Amino acid sequence: MKKEQNFISWALVYCILFLPFGCGAGKVSKQKAQMIEVHRPVVVERTGQDDRPDWTTKQAFMERDGNLVYTGGIMGGADYALTLRLARSEATKNLLESIQIKARGEFSSVIHGQNRTENDLGRYVTDAVAWTVDNIKISGIRQSEIYYEKVLDPINHSFKYNAWVQVTISRSDYVKAKTDAAQKLLEKAIREKDAGARQKALELIEKLRQEA
């Protein structure tokens, strides 16, 4: 009986001493969660959709309906118009960098195999890639989608802007840009009386005509 009384006494002491701390910890945790929620940035304006569209969070490049589509995004901009411009610039940069890589690989696969030095090969490929990119810029990069958010920062009591832009070129425009570059490559080879480069330029033009 005495042992049971001692056990009950210790149990009461434990409850008195430690239970408030447990409750206090739970209260602090709840207050912390509330503080985080209060200071969370709030979207106060957006372009139509209830949520960010899927394309803003997916890969920067995709092919859709015969078009090459590139995405760029900027978060935390201080000005709406500037943020949109920066997002479009980012999308355009992604497009041009991708075209450079893509065109270099395609030109190299045709021009490679000539019995010539790597310096010669690199010179012709580099020229053809640069002409392709220039042709893409001239032919027109189209803006296809825009999404933006106006966000209130409760801590700084200021507005920030998030923006995403998609730009596209058609596959036919891309092929045409490469074909025009190949034609310039042919003209350069003829001027320089480079029979090997001339033959490869003709092969390249024929291959691109089949793609068109």
Image (tube, rainbow, N blue to C red):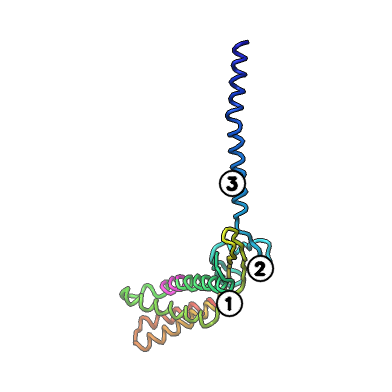
Residue 183 in percent (x, y) is at 45, 84
First in sequence: mark 1 vs mark 3: 3
Q: Residue furthest top?
A: 1
Question: Few, some or many C-alpha atoms within 10 Å of disc 3 (few <14, some 14-19, many ≥20)?
Answer: few
Q: Dot 1 corresponds to which residue?
A: 142
Q: Amino acid at mark 3?
A: Lys
Residue 107: say if magenta.
yes
Q: Dot 3 corresponds to which residue?
A: 32
Q: Is residue 125 above or below residue 36?
A: below
Residue in the picture at 62% in, 23% down:
12
Q: CA distance from mark 1 to mark 2?
A: 19 Å
Residue 58 in percent (x, y) is at 57, 61
Q: Which residues are magenta?
A: 101-108
Q: Secondary structure at mark 2?
A: loop
Q: Secondary structure at mark 3?
A: helix
Q: Dot 2 corresponds to which residue?
A: 47
Dots 1, 3 in contact, CB < 8 A: no
Mark whose residue sits in front, 1 or 3: 3
First in sequence: mark 1 vs mark 2: 2
